[in-house]
Amino acid sequence: MVTTSPLVSIVIPLYNQQLAYFQEALSSALAQTYGTIDILVSDNHSTNDVPAWLASQTDARLRVVRPDQFLPMVEHFQFAADQAKGDWILYLCSDDYLYPTCVETLVKHLPADGSAAVAYGELACVNFRDLNQIKFYYNRKPTGLRTAAQSLNELIKQRPFFAWIPGGMIRRDVYLHCREVLNGHITYGFDVAMLLKAHESGSILYVDEHIGKFRVWTAKDGKLGGNRLIKNIVDAGQCIQIVQHSPTLRGFLSADDLATWRSYQARRWELSALIDFFTGGCTAVEAKAALASVAEQIAPPGTFTKLVQLLLSRPLQALSRPTLNGMYGLFLHVQKFAKRPF
């Protein structure tokens, strides 16, 4: 365990967030039980009611910065972290939430030898309208310091996905090593890309305690950015390339495990396209375009691809859409009790 109290910068990139959600995020940062923190809000030239409210906040721990001009989202995340002063950097999206003991919990478990490149914990996916309605937990695994090889193998075999932001901390020098993934070639999946690349720099600490809540909502619910499906698929391909093109990361994995991960990601995103279609997030044409993107960016079509294409075909659309939507509603009902993403 560390014997000093490292400075932790909680970095909150902000742009036109709904005021109530941002207030919850900032309040959770200010409520941290760990004392040595630097809370940084980077406002990307918001035009709604948030800047006026933010200007009224007087807590001495809060710093507000702005880039010289509006930046694309991922580049704004880079700018915001660049302004941090801490030994560790913790991203908090402006609509998410940290448990009060988040930073204290992670710092308490840091190894004394400084070998941890990243520290993260258990995250809850919540109803976007109510932080207290937990849908499921993301990670659910034992507390421990993993070697980079152990952690990377664990992550690529984790189903259906993993998460480390909000609340995950990255060591400042490791952030600088990973900073290039925020240069704009990855649009939304840069959190995954950063965690994968961080495995080049040291061990990964996971603490099996609740540290944060992740609010999942989409353009259908009023979130900025439009439908992100195809860009998310492109990002998934970019994340795989980060591993494949890194001699260090590739050396941690067997060829079979890498191929299995790639295939799983392809089928996962094909399923996402189907779900987006029958829940009204996209048209059948857009879903088919997503399948084509999966084939181009991640892996060739498989048997499951043919099934999805069939369900998206014009003769079956009228039947498949309401049927699958009903089945999905049942799935979400079961998930509410199981608290697992399945």
Image: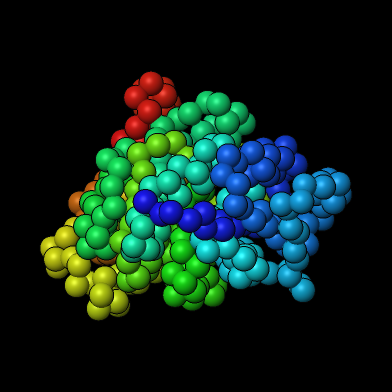
Q: Is residue 36 left or right of residue 4?
A: right
Tell me if residue 204 comes above or below residue 307 in the rendering. Answer: below
In the rendering, at what x and y percent does residue 208 appear? 35, 39
Closest to the observer: 152 or 146?
146
Query: Can you see residue 214?
Result: no
Instruction: Name the residue rendered at 70%, 56% in the picture.
Output: 41
Tell me if residue 285 comes above or below residue 243 in the rendering. Answer: above
In the rendering, at what x and y percent does residue 294 appear? 35, 61
Tell me if residue 340 comes above or below residue 287 in the rendering. Answer: above
Instruction: Name the residue rendered at 42%, 24% in the picture.
Output: 336
In the rendering, at what x and y percent does residue 233 appear? 41, 60
Q: Is residue 49 left or right of residue 106?
A: right
In the rendering, at what x and y percent does residue 9 appear? 59, 57
Tell me if residue 63 comes above or below residue 255 in the rendering. Answer: above
Instruction: Name the residue rendered at 21%, 57% in the picture.
Output: 150
Query: Can you see residue 33?
Result: yes
Q: Is residue 40 left or right of residue 289?
A: right
Instruction: Name the residue rendered at 34%, 32% in the picture.
Output: 340
Q: Split into 4 quadrants, where in the image is the C terminus?
A: top left
Q: Quadrant of residue 335?
A: top left
Q: Is residue 303 left or right of residue 285?
A: left
Closest to the observer: 85 or 272?
85
Closest to the observer: 224 or 168?
168
